[in-house]
Structures are given as C-alpha cells and as structure tokens.
Amino acid sequence: GSWIAAGDQQGFVHILSAENGAALMRVSVAAASARGTGRWVERLAWDSNRRLAAAAGRVVACLEVGNSGQESDQRVERWDVETQSAITALAFTGDGAIAVAAYGGIRLMRPAATASATESDKTGQSWGTKGSGDLL
C-alpha cells in the first residue's frame, strides 16, 4: 500500500493510508526525557525499501515498515546523535545509511539491517558498522 507519514509535537510519527486516510500505526521517536529534544518530529525521509527516518531534536529513528503497514509489522532503531544543535535535515544514501545534518557537519547513521558488520554498545543493542555516526 501507499502511506503518508506525519510527525507531531509529542515525539510520535503517524503512518496513514494514502488511499483512505486511515491511521495504520503510531511510533515514538523521542521520549519525554530524551536529551536535546523538544520532542517535535520535524524531519522525515522515506526510502524505496519502506524505511522511514525521523528526527526530533537530536534523536534519529529509523522505522522499517513491513508489508502490512501495521504496528505489529515494524522494527525501530534509535540514536541520540552527538551534535551541537537540533538536526536540520535527513536523507537516505544509496547504500542505505541515513545522512544526518546539523550545525557542525553531517553524520552517517547505519541501521543494523543495512550494515555488513555490527558492533554492540554497552546495552548489547546493534548499532551498525564501526563507521556509524562518524562525522563527515
């Protein structure tokens, strides 16, 4: 199906059916306690593989939406990006990384599903390749 995404001031992205406007899912991008965010989801970018990148303040989320478009058919990966300001732009690159722009530069975030090798942070979560988050 065809979908529309919209961010709100509470830190959520809403996925709607483009055909009839029906709400399909709601996904949290930034929790109320997230550092460096006013929680307003201001940046959204789709790729051709049904992945959606969303940014609220300094938090980036990558949502993989399954074929059904339902909440039970999704996977979310989040990063607290070390920047000097809120994120000003997002875009997917040809190799599936997310280019994240903010004052001071552009960083590439690599969702685990597109990474060829993974590493773990202190909690054991997968965070992509060793270059994920590097300043360009």
Image (cartoon, grey):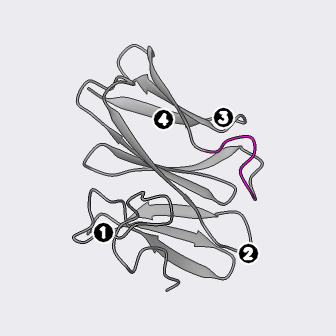
Label 1: element kind = loop
Q: Whole-Å distance between the Cαs marked 3 and 4? A: 10 Å
Between 72 and 91, the one nearer to me in the picture:
72
Contact flag, marks 1 and 4 (Cβ < 8 Å) = no
Q: Where's the N terminus, which quadrant?
A: top left
Residue where numbered disc 1 is placed? 118
Question: Residue 3 at x, y = what percent?
Answer: 37, 30
Disc with the residue nearer the chain's start (2 vs 1): 2
Q: As shown in the figure, which amino acid type bears the numbered disc 2?
A: Gln
Query: What amino acid type is highlighted by mark number 1?
Result: Thr
Q: Is residue 106 left or right of residue 113?
A: right
- Mark whose residue sits in front, 2 or 1: 1
Q: Nearer the viewer, mark 3 or mark 1?
A: 1
Please identify the quarter of the rendering in which residue 59 is found.
bottom right
Quarter of the image for residue 4 reads top left
Other-residue count near label 4 (Cα within 10 Å), few / some / many at <14 / 14–19 / ≥20: some
Name which residue type carries label 4: Ala
Asked if 40 appears above or below 95 in the picture, the reply is: above
Magenta stretch? 30-35
Residue 34 within the magenta-colored segment of the rendering? yes
Q: Are marks 2 and 4 in contact (CB under 8 Å)?
A: no
In the displayed structure image, the side of residue 88 where residue 90 appears, left or right = left
Is residue 121 magenta-colored?
A: no
Position in image of residue 120 (x %, y %): 40, 66
Residue at the disc numbered 2:
84
Residue for badge 4: 5
- What is the three-letter code of the residue carrying label 3? Asp
Chain-order first, disc 3 or disc 1: 3
**Distance from label 3 to label 1 (Cα)?**
32 Å
Structural distance between the alpha carbons of marks 2 and 4: 27 Å
Task: Please report whichever mark, 1 or 4, sits nearer to the chain's N-terminal start.
Answer: 4
Q: Is residue 3 above or below residue 82?
A: above
